[in-house]
Amino acid sequence: FNKHGDDVSCLAVDPAGEFVATGEMGKASLVCVWGAKDGVEQVQLKGVHKKGLVALAFGAGEGDKVVTVGKDEDHYVCVWDWKNGGGKLCGDKGG
C-alpha cells in the first residue's frame, strides 16, 4: 500500500482481520483504510488532524468505526464512520 505522502506513524487491523488502517505524520495528516489481503484502498479520512497522528484503532464488534488521536498539544480524538463514506461522527480534546 503506497497512498501515504508522509511517514506512517500508526497502524491497526480490524477485529475480523479484513481491513487495515494506517495514519501518517505531517500537516495534512491522512488515515487510509485498505484491504488487508488485496491492498485496495477503501476510504481516506482527512481534514481533522493537523500535526500527525499518534494512535488509531478500529472499534470493537464489526469494526465499522475508527478512532484517531492527533499529535497536537490537545491530542484531539476523533471517531470516524469509515464504512459509510468516512464521515467524522464526533471529536474533542483528549487528555
Image: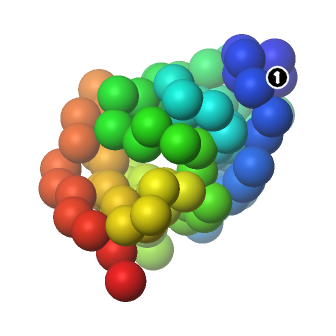
Image point (44%, 64%), residue name: 73
Q: From the viewer's perspective, is 47 left or right of 19? A: left
Viewer-nearest residue: 75 or 13: 75
Depicted 32 relative to depicted 80: above or below? above
The residue furthest left is 90
Amino acid of disc 1:
Phe
Q: Residues within 10 Å of mark 1 (few under 14, many from 20)?
A: few
Residue 87 showing in the rendered view: yes
- Residue 26 x/y as whole percent: 63, 32
Q: Quadrant of the N terminus?
A: top right
Q: Would residue 63 be seen by someone viewing this image from the given angle?
A: no
Q: Is residue 88 left or right of residue 75?
A: left
Element type at marker 1? Answer: loop
Residue at image position (51%, 25%) is 28
Q: Residue at x 54, y 29 (%)?
A: 27
Question: Among all residues in the image, which is located at the extreme front?
Answer: 73
| Quadrant of the image containing the C terminus | bottom left
Q: Looking at the rendering, which quadrant does residue 32 occupy?
A: top right
Q: Is residue 22 left or right of residue 47?
A: right
Residue at left 22%, top 58%?
A: 91
Q: Quadrant of residue 87?
A: top left
Q: Write down the residue under mark 1.
A: 1
Q: In the image, 37: left or right of 94?
A: right
Residue found farthest to the bottom: 95
Rendering coords of residue 4 (x, y %) = 72, 22
Write down the quadrant of residue 37 in the picture.
Answer: top right
What is the x, y in percent for residue 66? Answer: 43, 54
